[in-house]
Each structure stands twice: as C-alpha cells, then as structure tokens.
Amino acid sequence: MSEEPTGTNIEGEAPDAEPVVETEEATITDDAELERTLGLAGGLSIGIGTMIGAGIFVFPGLAGAEVGTAATASFGVGGVIALLVALPTSELATAMPKSGGGYYFVSRGLGTLAGTVVGLSLWLGLVFATAFYLVGLGFYAIDALAAVGIAVGASAGAVVSVLAVLFGIGFTVLNVTGTENAAKLQNGIVALLLSMLVAFLAFGLLEAFGVVDAGTPPGEAANVWEIVPIMSVAALVFTSYLGFAQVATVAGEMKRPGRNLPLAMVGSVLIVTVLYVLTIFVATNVFTQDALEVAGETAMVEVGRQLLGPAGALVIIVGGLLATMSSANASVLSTSRAIYGVSKDALLPRKASRINLKYGTPHVALGMAGGPVIVLAATRQVQLLAEVASFLHLLMYGLMCVALLSFRRDEPEWYDPDFRVPGGVAIPVVGALASFGLVAFMNLLSIAIGVAIVFVTAGWYFYYARDVRLRGAL
C-alpha cells in the first residue's frame, strides 16, 4: 500500500476546507477545486437525463409483465420515496455544495466509517447503474440496426455486450475532455428527448381514452393489485430514480447552489415521475402482460409500432437511444465525482483525486469509474444490475436522511443551509424508513450482493481508512 494516511483532518471544523493528509512519501495539500460551470439547466438535465432513460425505455416491458397496469403504482411508489429523499438531500447539498454528494453528507454527519461505506458503495452503485444503462443502450442499438435492415440474429446477445462496452469507453473519454462538453451533450439530448416523449405520450393518452383510434387490438394488461408484487417491482424500477441524487455529486460545479440544487433535484423527480406513470399507463393499455414479457427490454418499440406504425417504432428507437445515452453519460460523470470526493478525504489513495491540468477533470477517477462499468456491462444481466444499484443507493439515501437528523440535532456552527426541509423531522424520518424498507422487497441474490459490498467497504475502512478523521465529522 503506497499511501496510508497517518493523520488527517481536524474534527469539528467547517467541511469546506480541504483535508491535509500525511503520507509515507510527502505531505499533500490539495487546494484544487472543480470549476463551477453548471447552471439550473445543467442540473435538471443531469437529473432528468439520468432518470428518464431506463425508466421509460427499458422497464415498461419488465414491470408490466410482472404486475400489469399496477406497475403505475410501482413507479408512483418509487417517485414518492425519491421525493422524500430529494428534500433532505436538497437541504444537505445547500449546506455543503461539494463534489461527492451523498458520501460527503453522510461522512460529515455520521462519521468516517459510515462515510467510507457510503462513499465506496456510491461508487459501486453508480457503476452497476451505469452498466445497466449501457446494456439498455445496447438493446436499443440492436433495434436501430434492425430498422435499417441489419439483423444480427442469434448473435444479438454478444453484439449487445460489445456495443455496451464500446459506448462505455466512449462516454468515459468524453467526460475526460471536460464537464462542459459533457453537459452540452446532456442538455441537447434531454431537450430533444422530452419533445419526442411529450408528443408520443399525448397521442398514446388520446388513444387510451378513446379520443383517437389507432387500431390497437384490445389487450389491456391485467391488474395485480397486491402489495408485495407492487413493492417488488418498485424495488426493481427504483434504479430509474437515481438521477436526482446524482445532481448532488456535482454540487461543487454548480452555479448558485443554494437556488439551483433544490430546484434541480425536486424538479427532476416530479417531472420524471409524471412521465413514468403516463408511459407505463399507455404501455399496459396497448399490450397484455404476456405480450410485454415477450417484448422485454424494448417493449416500448412495439408500443410505438402499435400506436403509430413504423414511424412510431422509429421515434421510440431514436428516443431509447437518446435516453440510454443520456443516462450513461450522466452516470459516468457522477461516478467519477463520487470517487473524487472520497479520494480527497484520503479514504482512497489521493492519486484518484488528481485533476487533469488540460481539461480540469478528475481523469484518474474517470478511469476508476469506466473500467468496472465496462466489465459489468458485458454481462447483460439487466435486472441484477438494476437491483444491486438500487440496493446501494437506497442504503445511501436512508443514511442521508439519518445524517440530516444528526445535523438538526447538533446544529454545528458551519451548518447553514439555504434551503430547509419543511415539517421538522417528519420527512427525513419517513424517507429513511421508506428507503431501508424497500430493500426487503428485492430478490435474495441482489440483497446478498449488496450486503457483500457493504461488508467489503467496511473491511476497507478497518484496513486502510480507520485513522482518517474528517473535518465536520461527529
């Protein structure tokens, strides 16, 4: 181990000062900060762009096949839990507008052990989520190839893996060249995507309520209005709601964070929840559960074909490509910032927080984000990748709510948020219980992998980071 922290930050100081870490080689002081280039539009595009991909274009077939029209309730449950966490996260982020997001809040509120577990779990959770988005992108790329007459046949699975890996490499390289470049791509994709979705959903809703007749065969999906299946699907699709917290991971790069962070997080949750519920309603109005199950990850393409013919299928294929690209791009950015924040606190070797002098981006952290993403994307395990990502994020969300309760109790002098959650402690308490509770409805394999990752991250704390003390930590 080349860098082992032997002494670090002074406990109780404001967390906006950078840590000083003594190593065997030298004393490192890192005053470099990422430039604040992201405005409200950039924050919303990261939140909406990340959430809108898998939720609308990959999950309708999987969720509708499980519980039919009741999947609207599953997406609604996910949106409510996300909103319960987005409000506390907004308060924490305006008090501590630093890169690192949930890791930074938990480490300063609950201490180094919790911070290490959350910081490393956030890194790996975003890795699983990004791999999931890339696999979805691969499936839509296959449909795009088929639309132009290139059929891959029996080799489709292998092609999906290859495409997912290539896109992963591409997005990693893009983010190395600068946050502003990635944000411009993100803004353009999200604007085009929302325009397409609004037009498509408007026609789908008119058809569902009989205002227009698209000639779709009667085939409304059955309703499975039972609490356990609905909650199980909510646990699966919760990966769709990870984007709002990813806004907080780039808090150190946002202009006017006191205003823009709460608007970006809460606004992205509300907008995307409405889009999810409307989309699953349209999909389950067009197809039966069996048909949705057969269509699988690209069921929305067949929904578009039923509603608007080949043109509708083409719109959904293009939208799916844009959405999954947007999700993957935003997630690579956020994953690297999570690593950056943990490394700056010396919970990982400080080399991971080095900033590229040419582009002003954490290139080492981006490599640590892109590498494991590429490996996982090659597996094509859609549901497993989604649930493990949800598990690790729900752990962080619950602990963020607990951290807010800790700050409210102790009120350190430096804790002065520009936004405060209304209603006292009620929302963070309910947010914590809801986040932890949703984990119980996941598949056992996903829970086992998530628990194993938590134990590994705790082991890393005792092996490497137990002597680290963080400014602002309890």
Image (cartoon, rainbow, N blue to C red):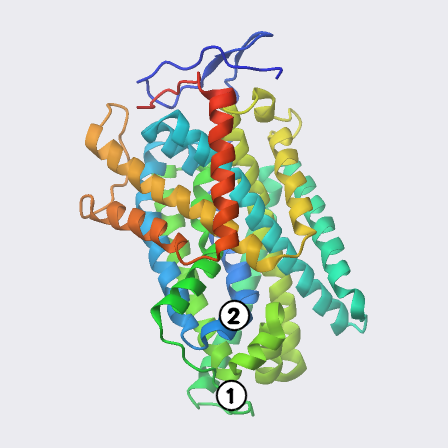
Who is closer to the viewer here, 388 or 149? 388
Tell me if 68 is positioned left or right of 157 in this view: left
- Residue at (58, 15) in percent of width and height: 3
Location of the C terminus by quadrant is top left
Q: Secondary structure at mark 1?
A: loop
Who is closer to the viewer here, 58 or 191? 58
Query: Residue 172 sits in which quadrant?
Result: top right
Q: Which residue is mark 1?
A: 219
Residue 128: x and y, percent? 57, 47
Residue 199: x and y, percent? 52, 74
Residue 451: x and y, percent? 47, 43
Amino acid marked by disc 1 = Gly
Tell me if 175 is positioned left or right of 111 in this view: right
Compared with residue 319, is residue 445 higher up or lower down, i.e. above or below? above
Amino acid marked by disc 2 = Pro
Location of the N terminus by quadrant is top right
Q: Secondary structure at mark 2?
A: helix
Compared with residue 325, is residue 72 higher up or lower down, i.e. above or below? below
Q: Residues within 10 Å of mark 1 (few under 14, many from 20)?
A: some
Q: Which mark is residue 60?
A: 2
Tell me if 440 is positioned left or right of 287 in this view: left
Who is closer to the viewer here, 117 or 243? 117
